[in-house]
Amino acid sequence: MKERKKKKGKGRVKKKQRVPAFPTETVHALFKKTWAGRNVKIHKNALLLSGEFLKLFTTEAVHRASSQVRRPGIPEEDSRQIDIEHLESILPQLVLDF
């Protein structure tokens, strides 16, 4: 069997940047505030999974809001920043999808 040589330069595959998950301490603090006064225990795996879910939700919100920013007819200088109006416009459908 022949070994394939790795290509250098243009043939190189870029690694995807990994978006960090929400820290478990942050997720735990959110849960504590939500369930204040209740005797609820949260398993470590539930915190990790919830952090991943929050990461996916936030990433999807940013992607959808950025598509609102880049709509046709919007000047280039105005299409560089996501504002609250962009997030508000995508939020109803985002919540339904999740």
Image (tube, rainbow, N blue to C red):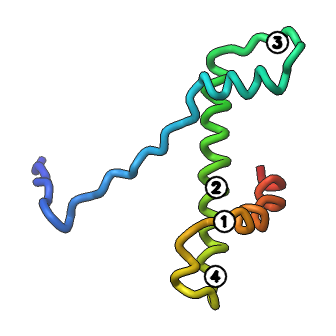
Type of the residue with mark 4: Arg
Task: Please tell me which of labels 4 and 2 falls first in the chain.
Answer: 2
| Residue drawn 68% across the image and 22% down it | 28
In the picture of the structure, the residue carrying the numbered disc 1 is 83
Type of the residue with mark 3: Val
In front: 4, or 28?
28
Q: Are marks 1 and 2 in contact (CB under 8 Å)?
A: no
| Residue drawn 52% across the image and 81% down it | 77
Disc number placed over residue 40 in the picture, else none: 3
Type of the residue with mark 1: Asp
C-alpha gap between disc 3 and disc 2 = 29 Å
Residue 72 location (% of width, % of height):
62, 88
Residue 38 location (% of width, % of height):
88, 13
Residue 16 location (% of width, % of height):
39, 52
Kindly give the residue lying farthest to the bottom in the view shown.
73
Task: Please tell me which of labels 3 and 4 falls first in the chain.
Answer: 3
C-alpha gap between disc 3 and disc 1 = 36 Å
Task: Please tell me which of labels 3 and 2 falls first in the chain.
Answer: 3
In this rendering, the count of numbered labels is 4
Type of the residue with mark 2: Glu
Using residue 26 as the reference point, say whether residue 84 is left or right of it: right
Q: Is residue 42 above or below residue 19?
A: above
C-alpha gap between disc 4 and disc 1 = 14 Å
In the picture of the structure, the residue carrying the numbered disc 4 is 71
In the picture of the structure, the residue carrying the numbered disc 2 is 60
| Residue drawn 33% across the image and 51% down it | 15
In front: 66, or 2?
66
| Residue drawn 64% across the image and 49% down it | 58
In front: 45, or 82?
82
Q: Nearer the viewer, mark 3 or mark 1?
A: 1
SS label for mark 3? loop
Task: Please tell me which of labels 1 and 2 falls first in the chain.
Answer: 2
